[in-house]
Amino acid sequence: MNVNTCDDNDSILWHKRLGHFNYATLKRMVDLKMTSDLPEIQELNNVCEACQLEKQTIIVFPDTAFRATSKL
């Protein structure tokens, strides 16, 4: 049995475990031997739900919002 084999599930698992790094960065970490016992990572094109939510933009408050002119 080869320990360095990987399927999509291992790549997704390590993507989540290491703080949602992109797959290219994880693959580079393996190639540069920056980690020990990390399996070979495949670069996947899918985006996990947490990453997709983080990439959404936030709607800012309008500049014409009501501002109090005196104390309560």
Image: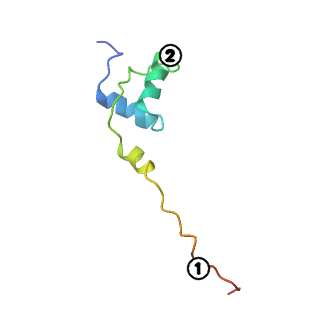
Instruction: In the rendered view, tell whether residue 6 sits above or below residue 14.
Output: above
Residue 48 in picture, x, y percent from top left: 35, 42
Q: Are marks 1 and 2 in contact (CB under 8 Å)?
A: no
> In the image, is 71 to the left or to the right of 31?
right
Q: Which residue is mark 2?
A: 33
Residue 50 in picture, x, y percent from top left: 40, 46
N-terminal of the pair, mark 1 or mark 2, is 2
User: Given this view, does label 1 or label 2 mark the residue nearer the observer?
Assistant: 1
**Element under label 1?**
loop
Instruction: In the rendered view, tell whether residue 53 sits above or below residue 22.
Output: below
Figure coloring:
rainbow
Residue at 36% across, 16% down: 4
Q: Residue furthest front?
A: 64
Quadrant of res 26: top left
- Distance in Å between CA atoms under marks 1 and 2: 56 Å
Mark 1: give few (<14), some (14-19) or many (20+) Cα within 10 Å: few
Mark 2: give few (<14), some (14-19) or many (20+) Cα within 10 Å: few
**Towards the viewer: 66 or 30:** 66
Residue at 38% across, 23% down: 41
Which quadrant is the N terminus positioned in?
top left
- Tag count: 2
Residue at 47% across, 27% down: 25
Q: Which residue is mark 1?
A: 66
Which quadrant is the C terminus positioned in?
bottom right
**Element under label 2?**
loop
Q: Residue furthest right?
A: 71
Q: Residue furthest top?
A: 1
Q: Amino acid at mark 1?
A: Phe
Q: Amino acid at mark 2?
A: Lys
- Disc ID at residue 30: none
